[in-house]
Image (tube, helix red, strand yellow):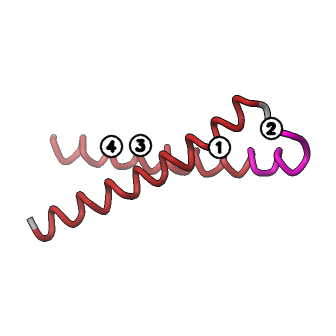
Amino acid sequence: MINLLETINQLSLVLLLLCTFFYYWHLKKNKKQRKLTTFEFLDVFTIKLAIFVGAGSYVLLFLDRNYG
């Protein structure tokens, strides 16, 4: 049962990551056409920060599992 829940959690994270990339791509496309609103600009900043923090935490967890 725990393995099933972990698998569902990992799939949801992958789906969330894909949606984030598509939304980021959409905002970059809009930026070329017009100036972004303040909310859209904050979204771009938040997405970049979230990807960086998520990737960093994943690497730290990976290293902890293999060398800890």
Image vertical order of residue 23 relative to residue 66, above or below: above
Q: Which residues fall within the magenta stretch?
A: 27-35
15 horizontally vs 39: left or right: left
Q: Earlier in the sequence, mark 2 or mark 3?
A: 3
The residue beneath circle 3 is 12
Do the residues under discs 2 and 1 have CB atoms within 8 angstroms?
yes
| Left or right: 28, with 33 as reference point | left
Tell me the tag on residue 23.
none
- Residue at (49%, 51%) from the top-left corner? 51
What's the magenta bit mostly, secondary-structure-wise? helix
Where is mark 1, residue-wise?
A: 44
Give how far across and how far down residue 17 sits, in percent: 50, 49
- Measuring from the top left, give residue 53's x and y in whole percent: 41, 50
Q: Determine the residue located farthest toward the right in the rendered image.
A: 33
34 inside magenta stretch: yes
Say what amino acid the circle numbered 4 marks: Ile
Please, what secondary structure does the residue beneath circle 2 have? loop
Disc 3 versus disc 4: distance between alpha carbons? Answer: 6 Å
